Structure formats: C-alpha cells, structure tokens
Image (cartoon, rainbow, N blue to C red):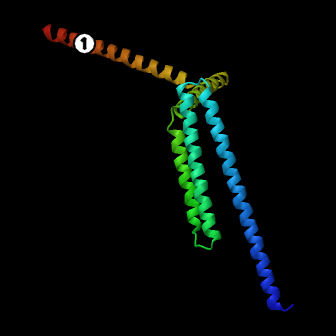
Amino acid sequence: MSETNQSTAAGEQWSEYAEELNRSFVEAFEQNMRMQTEFLDSWRESLAEGDLDETTVDGMQGASRAYEVWMEAADAQYELVGESLRGEDVDLEEFRDVWLTAANDAFKEVMGTSAFAAATGQTVGEMLEAGEQLDQLNRETLGSLGFATDGDIQEVGERLVELERRQHAVEQKLDRLVELVEEANTEEP
C-alpha cells in the first residue's frame, strides 16, 4: 500500500471515529436532557399534589424557571456544538456568553422569589444574632481581663457629661454670688 493510500485510509478512519464520537456525544446529551425534563415534570406533579405555603411554592416555581433557563442554555450550547461539528465558524466567546447569560437569568429567577427574600431575611437575622452573641462574649472576656469595654467607656462618658452639667450649674451660681457681692460693695459708701 502506498503512502497516499495509507494517509487516505487513516484520514477516513479518523473521520469515522470523529463522527462516531460526535454521534455518541449528541445521543448522551439528548438522553441527559430527556431525563432532566422527566425529573422536572415528575417533581412539578408531586408539588401540585402537596399542601405547601405560598412562599415555598413561589421558591419552587423560581427554581423551576431557573432550571428552564439552564435547559434553554443547554439547547443553545447543543446548537453551537452542532454548528461547530458541521465546520461552521463558532466563536468560543459564544459558548461562554450562553452560560454567563443563563447564569445571570437563572439567578434573577431565584432571587426574585419571596422564598429567597425569606431565606435571606432569616440568614441576616441569624447573622445579627450571632454578631450580638459574639459582642457579648467579647465584652465579658475584656471585662474579665480588666480591660474597659464599650459599656464602661459609655458609662464614663455619661458621668463626664453629668459632671460638666453640674460644674456649669455651680459656675453659674458662683457668678451670681460674685455679682451680688460686687453689688453689695458698690452700694456701701
């Protein structure tokens, strides 16, 4: 067999291998999409049968809408792969943009729900409570080590303000006494 024939045969084998690989990829991708769709449909049906509060239902609907966004992105990605396999010029940035846009849209779907707002509020509340507990622990530790705490400093500040108020009142009385003494001295001639 000549080198040209060997090269042609190798090229044909490679093309067959690439086609089989592409076909396997497409079949696996389609099967994955079908399975995910079936799961989502069964999940929706089971939720419809349950007795759930509005916030939970809203959260699940937001998650479902986000899932649909991801599936649309997967379809778009599938199309781009198909175009690329057909030899069309597909910019790699298109692949990236599909997923970035999908991520942005999916987050919007989830973050716009009352369930997300409730979960965020609960998390913030728990963080504030944990912060208060940590502050209390810090105050107790500083106090046991003999250091001034913010409460001690605030108490000292309040006492200083009270002392300044009293000092001012005493100064006013002294000024009034000085005035009376000076008036009395000017009247005696």
Farthest residue toward the right?
A: 1
Residue indicated by mark 1? 176
Q: Is 133 or 4 nearer to us in this picture?
A: 4
Q: Quadrant of residue 140?
A: top right
Q: Quadrant of residue 124?
A: top right
Vertical order, 170 against 82 (above or below): above
Vertical order, 114 against 140 (above or below): below
Query: In screen coordinates, is 3 left or right of 108?
Result: right
Regarding residue 100, the answer to whether it shows in the image is yes
Query: In screen coordinates, is 59 left or right of 15?
Result: left
Looking at the rendered image, the quarter that the N terminus falls into is bottom right
Q: Is 149 or 122 nearer to us in this picture?
A: 122
Regarding residue 124, the answer to whether it shows in the image is no
Residue sitting at 78 percent across and 85 percent down?
8
Q: Quadrant of residue 90?
A: bottom right
Query: In screen coordinates, is 172 left or right of 114?
Result: left
Query: In screen coordinates, is 5 left or right of 23?
Result: right
What is the number of callouts on the image?
Answer: 1
Residue sitting at 52 percent across and 39 percent down?
111
Vertical order, 43 against 79 (above or below): above
Looking at the rendered image, the quarter that the C terminus falls into is top left
Mark 1 is surrounded, within 10 Å at the Cα level, by few (under 14), some (14 to 19) or many (20 or more) other residues, namely: few
Residue sitting at 57 percent across and 29 percent down?
56
Q: Is 68 or 1 nearer to us in this picture?
A: 1
Residue 59 on image: x %, y %? 56, 34
Q: What's the amino acid at mark 1?
A: Arg
Residue 72 on image: x %, y %? 57, 52
Residue 68 on image: x %, y %? 57, 46
Residue 28 on image: x %, y %? 72, 56
Q: Secondary structure at mark 1?
A: helix
